[in-house]
Amino acid sequence: MFKAHAALQYIIIMIILISVVNAKSLRNHDRRLAQSENLTASPIPGLHTSINLGTGISSCYGTQQEAILDIYFSTAGNSDLPTTTVLHLPGGAYMNLVPDTIEKAGIDYLNAGYTLAVLYYRLPRSSTEKSWLICSDPWDAIVDVSAAMKVLRDGADIYRVDPNQIVISGFSAGGHLAALYGSTCEARWSCPRSLVLHFPFLETGAKIFCSNIGSSFSNIQDYNDCFPTTLVDKAMPPTVLYHASGDTIVSTDEMTAFVQSMSVQGVAHEYYEVPGGGHFLVPFQQVVDASAGTLGGDTYAALIEKSLDMPSPECSRCDDIPSKWMIDNGKSCDIEEWSVQNRCNTSVSWVEDGYCRQSCFDYGKGYTDEICCEPKTENNHPSMHPSTSSCIECSDIPPQFILDLHKTCATATYSIKKNCIDNSWWVENNLCQKSCDAAGRGYPGIKCC
């Protein structure tokens, strides 16, 4: 009888312990699964609203994920007015969402009078099963960032957001995500005013994003399409970079290479390398000491302010999204000259919707207050299909999911790499014909001029 009672007590204790572990896991790993009306799991007080972004459900080994955006209002200053807003991307190696930076830097942002938006983005790795494999599409996280930016801009009056003063602040894996988004965003009004990157997971993050679902990411060699260091261009938002020399997860060499890329492209930036420390936030005075007198303040909110003091890029990345009529008739912006000549900045609907932004600008009919950067050359590989003496004027019509990402065939390099001639549906519908050809992945019997 005594043994049975002791065994029952043991079982009860184990159930309690498991419940505690599961509760912590919900908070740290699966907070993004919380429903919008559940405001009790927030790692810091003052949560105003929690929004399910509706970007879809991803699944890793049966665990479903949805992107959640938590918005906090500051009680400092005149908090009823639109203000600088920080979109906070926590880290966790793309397999967890760890709340420690929210509890530290997030509080600093609120105390400085900023609106705080924490994004619990979808993750491509599992923390409990086969963490070395990619278990869902990494690019879902980029879709989540884009959706969060849209919510903040569209709901600026509701959420106390100054749409011209949105800063993305990323930590570790969230730092890679912020840098990747900042180096690829091209839809109208989609880019942040600036970036603040804390020990960003640049190289490993790139390997994760360029790996196929079901594959191991550690040994991948070709990851430039997901590597912010190689993607940096003149349209990159001004960037503040923080790192500690004692970091054993992200090397100083990764940081200096990233800084060099920004310097080459003329991107406004500041780099603070703290001696010692590690892959975490050190006491902020150490950052001030490492700044050689260029940084003031006493909290991590000072990095946000520093990023806003730097000049914006002189030009923007411009997408080239065709109108519905063009899509229905198999036309793309770069070959439909009549529409570009007679629409663009003289058509009310085109001005409102921003169709063919790059082509309109190139034709001298760009939209007001918009200067488009010259697109970077994405691919210089020779075509793989047999050469012929004649060529055709190819279209470049993207599938719907590329349009949903606010991208074009020319800029959706990851999709080009994974589809084109390898996807029978793309072949049948001649999708992204021109970009596939330029990437050396053109369709049989077709040579683009």
Image: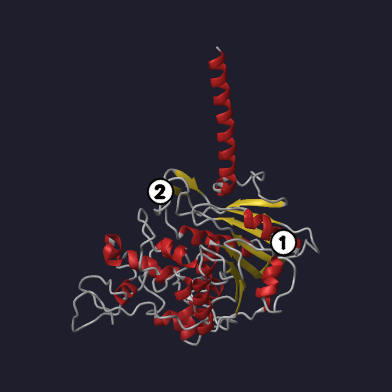
- Residue at 39% across / 53% down in the picture? 133
Residue 245 in picture, x, y percent from top left: 57, 69
Q: CA distance from mark 1 to mark 2?
A: 36 Å
* Among the 4 quarters of the image, the one containing residue 114: bottom right
In the image, residue 60 above or below residue 325 = above
The crowd level at tag 1 (other Cα within 10 Å; few <14, some 14-19, many 20+) is some
Q: Circle 1 sits on which residue?
A: 108
At label 2, which amino acid type do we have? Answer: Lys
Query: How many marks on residues?
Result: 2
Query: Which residue reaches farthest right?
Result: 77
At label 1, which amino acid type do we have? Answer: Asp
- Residue at 63% across / 62% down in the picture? 281
Residue 299 in picture, x, y percent from top left: 72, 65
* Among the 4 quarters of the image, the one containing residue 408: bottom left
* Among the 4 quarters of the image, the one containing residue 436: bottom left
Asked whether residue 215 is in view, the answer is yes
Q: Nearer the viewer, residue 89 or 438?
A: 89
Q: Circle 2 sits on which residue?
A: 130
